[in-house]
Structures are given as structure tokens and as C-alpha cells.
Image: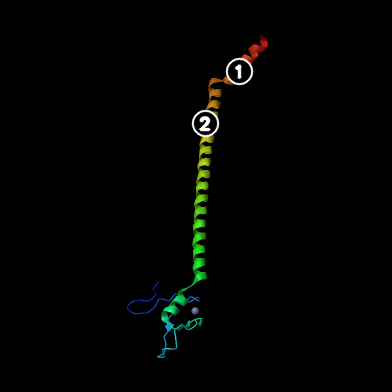
């Protein structure tokens, strides 16, 4: 991966570990042997000195632990998202079951009301008693 801009030759540096985004290499001051390094203006973190700017960019932008942590976070986010989806599904199934039970309950209440009304209208209890009395006499 080439981190250098073809026109300006100004490399892209990742922010410093302290969060400082204004990171730039310290160019050799007219001395071809002075090398390239970075010194953070905020936390004063200092890199080793490299012969070429490319080496410095590669060193500075290489963050194996940070990259590993980022991909682990991504992995866990995906996992959490999937678990959330699963629990939403089971919640929906629960709500559906409750809904179905409520319907059954309502129809049972209606049926029992109907039978109570039927008892009152047709006097089933009275008729039963009359039949019982008739049976006892005979
Ligand atoms: Zn810093």
C-alpha cells in the first residue's frame, strides 16, 4: 500500500496514540543523513529515525494491536447484533403466544356466558330439579 500522495509527496499519517491528528514527519534539515522521524506535538511521543520517509510512514501507520482490537470489536458487535435479533424473535413468539391465549380465553368466557344465559332463559336448573323430584317420587 502506497501512503504517499503522488503529487504532493505528503504522506498520510494516522493520528497519534494520544489522539493528535496533526502528525507530520520531521524532514531532514538539509542534512541527507539526518533521517525521518515523528515527534507528537501533544504527547511528545518520538519515533525512531528512519532513512526514508516510506519507512517512517510504514512504521507509524502500522498498528497491529489497534487493528486486532478493531477487528475484535467488529466481531463482538456482529455477535451482539445477532443475539439481539434472536431475542427479538423469541420476544415476538412470546407476544404471539400470549395473543393466542387471550383469544382462547375470550372465546371461553363467551361460551360460559352463553351457557349461563341459556340456563337462565331455558330454566335448565328448574327442569333438572323437576326431573329429580319426579324420579324420587316414582
Ligand atoms: Zn501524541
Badge 2 element: helix
What is the quadrant of residue 6 in the picture? bottom left
Q: Residue at x 67, y 10 (%)?
A: 137
Q: Residue at x 51, y 40 (%)?
A: 99
Q: Quadrant of the C terminus?
A: top right
**Residues at circles 2 and 1 in contact by the CB criterion of under 8 Å:** no
Reading the image, the residue beneath label 2 is 110
In whole angstroms, how far apart are the C-alphas of marks 2 and 1?
A: 24 Å
**Spot occupied by residue 42 in the image (x, y as percentages of width and height):** 49, 81
Q: Residue at x 52, y 35 (%)?
A: 104
Q: Quadrant of the N terminus?
A: bottom left
Q: Residue furthest left?
A: 7
**Spot occupied by residue 35 in the image (x, y as percentages of width and height):** 44, 86
Crowd rating for badge 2 (residues with CA inside 10 Å; few <14, some 14–19, many 20+): few
User: Nearer the viewer's eye, disc 2 or disc 1?
Assistant: 2
**Spot occupied by residue 41 in the image (x, y as percentages of width and height):** 47, 83
In the rendered image, is residue 15 in sight? no
Front residue (pair 121, 31): 31
Q: Is residue 119 left or right of residue 4?
A: right
Q: Residue at x 50, y 60 (%)?
A: 75
Q: Which of the two labelled residues, at mark 2 and mark 1, occupies the earlier sequence position?
A: 2
Tell me which colouring the rendered structure shows.
rainbow
Crowd rating for badge 1 (residues with CA inside 10 Å; few <14, some 14–19, many 20+): few
Reading the image, the residue beneath label 1 is 128
Front residue (pair 72, 105): 72
Judge whether 138 appears above or below 72 on screen: above
Badge 1 element: helix
**Spot occupied by residue 58 in the image (x, y as percentages of width and height):** 44, 76
Q: Residue furthest bottom?
A: 30
How many marks on residues? 2
What is the quadrant of residue 21 in the picture? bottom left
In the rendered image, is residue 134 in sight? yes
Amino acid at each position: 500500500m502506497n501512503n504517499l500522495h503522488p503529487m504532493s509527496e505528503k504522506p498520510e499519517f494516522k493520528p497519534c496514540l494520544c489522539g493528535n491528528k496533526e502528525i507530520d514527519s520531521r524532514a531532514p534539515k538539509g542534512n541527507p543523513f539526518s533521517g525521518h522521524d515523528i515527534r507528537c506535538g501533544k504527547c511528545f511521543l518520538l519515533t525512531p529515525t528512519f532513512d526514508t520517509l516510506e519507512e517512517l510512514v510504514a512504521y507509524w501507520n502500522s498498528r497491529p494491536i489497534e487493528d486486532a482490537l478493531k477487528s475484535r470489536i467488529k466481531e463482538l458487535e456482529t455477535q451482539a447484533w445477532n443475539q439481539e435479533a434472536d431475542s427479538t424473535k423469541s420476544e415476538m413468539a412470546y407476544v404471539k403466544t400470549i395473543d393466542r391465549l387471550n383469544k382462547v380465553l375470550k372465546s371461553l368466557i363467551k361460551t360460559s356466558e352463553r351457557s349461563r344465559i341459556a340456563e337462565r332463559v331455558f330454566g335448565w336448573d328448574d327442569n333438572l330439579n323437576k326431573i329429580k323430584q319426579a324420579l324420587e317420587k316414582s
